[in-house]
Image (cartoon, grey):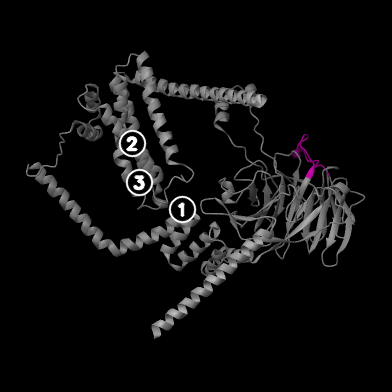
Amino acid sequence: MKRRELRTTYFYKSLILVCLLSLFLYTSLLFAANSPFLSYTISGKNEWKVTQDSYVVSEVLFKDMDLYYPEDLFIKDGKHYIADSGNARIVVYNPSTKEVSYIGDMTLFQPTGLFVDDSFVYVADPGTSEVVIFDKEGNEIKRIGRPTNPLFGETANFKPKKLVVDKRGNLYIVSEGTFEGIIQLDKNGEFLGYFGSNTVGITLLDKFIDIFYTKEQKEKFLNRIPKPYANIAIDAKGLIYTITQKEQGSAIKKHNTIGNNILSLSREGRMVDEPNFTDIAVDKNGRIFALTETGLIYEYDPEGNLLVSFGGRAISTERNGLFTVASAIAVSDDGKVLVLDRERGLVHVFNPTQYIHILHKAIELYSEGKYLESKDLWKELMVYDGYSKIAHYGLGKAYFQEGNYRAAVNEFRKAYEKRDYSDAYWEIRNETLQKKMGLIFSLLIVLIITFFVTDELSRRGKLTLRFEPKNKLLSDILYIKNMLKHPLDTFYYIQRKRHGSVASASIIYILFLLVIQFDYFGRSFIFNLNVQDRSIGFVLLASAAPTMLWVLANYLVSSINDGRGTLRDIYIFTAYSFAPYILFQPLVILLTYVLTYNEAFIISLLSNALIVWSAILLFTGVKEIHDYNLRNTIKSILLTLVWIFVIILVYSIVYMLWDQLVQTVYAIIQEVLYRAR
């Protein structure tokens, strides 16, 4: 009877849970259908996934204000300050009283940027090439023009576009066309220097030009100018944030007091960003908001991890939450996100939803190191969004802190965080070794004893371990092991046709390609090669094509350079040269399931050693098969590589011409059919 009551209770609880989940899904779909835009997040594999609505539009401001091409927006003490560039004024709006006032409507020319502190309103006016400072009542205090300091440079641009001011009154100015960095002035307008200049990437072509070109040619071909900053923001701690357009992975930077980028994801070029960011804002908790001209809003945590993306462009119809040309973003103290539409002269107000409130609270606890306290919040967040990378990562941290390492590795794997996965796996491995240490030592001793006993019996002739297959093909395939001890003899017997055949070489090539596939797709999670976007066919082509091109090109080169090897010899010895990689790389791959991230150098060392070993055998094979001296061997290999390049180049040209021919013929046929109608 008691068991039946328990079953009934369990049934009703399950039924209630199913009903609640169904209601949740229904309301989520209903809100998604009514929302003019979707919210997105990033999964562990860096794939975009639709998530719950993170923000909803609560109101649209300034419909009757006639703002004309406004450029900037700032919130201070609850008031909204707008750089109404087209009307040459600053609009001050108080949401509480609905009062509107104006600053500089008779003195400004083209305000595009503004910053407000406790005492003053700072306006960047590129029309007059000045920074104009007002008090809160709108009285002009001073104008700061072009610095007179010789260090600033006579030809340097000074057209203030955006600016921020730190607690000491120092100004950080983004100027049009200034690539040296952010212009830093003190409160009196004295030039302090350039702050945090962008770096210039050096390509292989640039390095080639550096080596071989003259000074005049370098000045003509090289244009090593850092990209200018597009906008700037400052947080409560005084740290400077910048955005750079036409950058991928490092568009957002967080600068310390000496101008260095301290946002690790940005420094490594791994941030999820956009090349057309136009504005940036930082809330009181250090979360970063970036805006594109097309109206996409990206929200990041203080470490630069993407939380959500929402918003978008109004293409055919004007809808709240979508923008024609977005120009500025600001965040209020109560978490509302305000976005300025320059084309329509409106400000859209986004209110955070319950989903984003939970996410923010979880991140705050995580940032404070309270992983266990954030555990329930991460779990609650999973109900809203099971794909969120940061949610899986936060839950993994909570499990790790709790000591539940097996649950932690599952979450870190979903978040695709290899280093944290490795730390949790190390704890599991350490725990397993401690429990099984006696068994492991016993097995090791048994293996050692077995090895010595079999070796001794083999030397006395009482045990035969040598396997000599009667099948010629199988014998030729197993002959690959001879390459490890006696490579010169192996190449000699291959050329004399005593060992090796086209059939055995073909099978060895197949084994080689299978090992490469295993290497790409069979490694452990910690050491995998990030191949989620690569197919088996791609890896097969990328490994088989160069190998066959080597065989063909080397035969062509040896034919005109007195090489003794035939096409058959080259085909066979090349296959046998891969012996170290074929025989030992699978063991290295299996080793990836035992080692952790801290021991990655062992995997790299062993893999590289096997590749170098195979390359040495290939070099030796060219020398022995063609009967070359050292100089002619090097010459043959270099010419072979040149021929491979030429073959690829010719194929590319023929392919493009053929594709163009097919398109032309198709267009002619379509035109004839059209006229025939």
Q: Is 335 situated left or right of 382 in this image?
A: right
Highlighted magenta segment, given as a residue range = 145-160
Q: Is residue 372 visible?
A: yes
Amino acid at pointer 1 = Lys
The percent position of residue 411, horizontal first and vertical second, equals: 47, 60
Residue at mark 2 to residue at mark 1: CA–CA distance = 28 Å
Say if 548 sits above or below 375 in the image: above
Residue at 47% over, 80% down? 9
Image position of 168 with respect to 293: above or below: below
Mark 2 or 1: in front is: 2
Apparent side of residue 610 relative to residue 197 in the rendered image (left or right): left
x and y, in percent, of residue 316 in the image:
74, 47
For image coordinates 23% across by 23% down, the residue present is: 492
Amino acid type indicated by mark 3:
Ile
Residue that sits furthest to the bottom in the current view:
1
Name the residue beneath numbered marker 2. Answer: 512
Count residues near mark 2 (Cα–Cα under 10 Å), then give few for <14, some for 14-19, many for 20+.
many
Which numbered dot is residue 589? 3
Q: Residues within 10 Å of mark 1 (few under 14, many from 20)?
A: some
Circle 2: element type: helix
| Labelled pair 2, 3 in contact (Cβ < 8 Å) | no
Q: Residue at x 50, y 76 (%)?
A: 13
Expressed as whole percent of the image width and height from the top left, the position of residue 19 reads 55, 71
Residue that badge 1 annotates: 418
Q: Examine the residues drawn in magenta and state their main secondary structure.
A: loop
Give the secondary structure at mark 1: helix
Q: Secondary structure at mark 3?
A: helix
* The N terminus lies in quadrant: bottom left
Pick the quarter of the image with the C terminus: top right
